[in-house]
Amino acid sequence: MTSQINPNNIDGTYPVAGQDNSSQGFRDNFTNTKNNFTYAYDEITELQANAALRGQTNEFADSIIANVALRGQRDVVFDFGAVTGAQTYTFGNGSYQTMELAGSVVLSFAGFPTLTNRALKIRLRVFVPNTSFTLTWPAQVSQNLSSIANTAGQIVSFTQTGFYEFELTTTTSNATPGNITWSISEITRNRNTQQASLSITTVVANATATGISMTASNVAGVAVGNITATNFIGNIISIGNSISVTGNITANNIIANIGFFGNIRTPIQSNITLVGTLTSLSVSGNANVGNLNVTGMTDMCGGTAYGLQYEAAITNGGSTQLLSNIGFAILRSNGTIAAHTVIMPATPKSGQIIQLAFANTVTTLTQSGSGTQTCNGAFTTANSSQGGTWIYHSVTDAWFRVG
């Protein structure tokens, strides 16, 4: 504002000493002096009404202050105190506000001006005394909210008590207060912890390419993470259920606490060791092994399983179920018995051979297959040192006596 006070319209040399002076000169000086005092009064009154003196508030009404250097400036803090339930962040209370959660809080905004080529930045500092309390942001807070740790929708949870500080910014042009969209970031929480996905990129042929992507999600109450990359070099540690790798794995040892499932394929593999229990093993070439210990059958297109079943005291009128993983069975009783039943193996392999021998006499012997099996050439009586040999044929589900 340009002042209307004009000190030059007052003649400081009037009246002139030693001569007659016109009274008009006095009147001109008095009039101009009075006018200047009037101007001064009006301007000082306006300054007092609209300009900030020490300890007072100055309302600039969105006026632009250009090319200014500031020293020692600070924000006025508005403290909500200990609050719970619905709370309103009002623009007129200042751009830095604090609250203590006395329970879960649902926040709303009010009093924000219409934005025309302006940027706003506000902060909220929250003290959380109890990790069961949550903070719900207004719907206008939508940009970057998913990157805030422990966020589901608009609700932020806290895993530790203490202070948390959030900064919100907007550069929306020509927006009405209700349509302002805010971007949020967190100032205080550990930067080593990030929620949702993370992508690490590089430049390939002047285009951005994702080298590694990491995601974490809540699956039925379990935190599940995925790492995707073309190649992994170094250490891979997983506490989850599986690792899916489409590139190369280089490691001194691969250790599985439960077992390996699926295929292990290498260009040249001299030995596969410590693989746990194999439910099935298919070899298209030659299998060159040292010692092969099995508790079940080895199906080698017909052959003998060398396991032995020895029954030391079969009983009169009782029965003996031959095991499926043996090739020999010896049945002994305490002297001659009148009757006994022998049942062939329940789950034999095609081509499996069973050799059966008796150490004592069984006057009436019943020898049958298991379930639907038939037993051809079955013994009807057994004598000391008597024995026979049967081979199983899976297509006919039958045992055939061959010796």
Image (cartoon, helix red, strand yellow):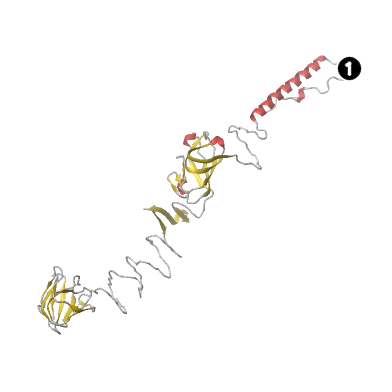
* In the displayed structure image, the side of residue 299 where residue 55 appears, left or right: right
Q: Could you classify mark 1 by the number of other residues whose Cα lies within 10 Å: few (under 14), some (14-19), or many (20 or more)?
A: few
| Secondary-structure class at tag 1 | loop
Point out the residue furthest to the bottom here.
385
Left or right of 47? Residue 165 is left
From the top left corner, tell me how far across and down residue 337 is, in percent. 13, 79
- Residue 57, percent across and down? 63, 33
Q: How many marks?
A: 1
- The correct choice, above or below, for 299 with respect to 81 in the image is below
> What amino acid does circle 1 point to?
Gln
x%, y% of residue 272? 35, 73
Question: Between residues 48 and 8, which one lies in front from this camera angle?
Answer: 48
Question: Residue 280, percent across and down?
Answer: 27, 69
Q: According to the image, label 1 marks what residue?
A: 19
Compared with residue 64, is residue 29 higher up or lower down, i.e. above or below? Answer: above
Residue at 73% x, 20% y: name it.
Answer: 35
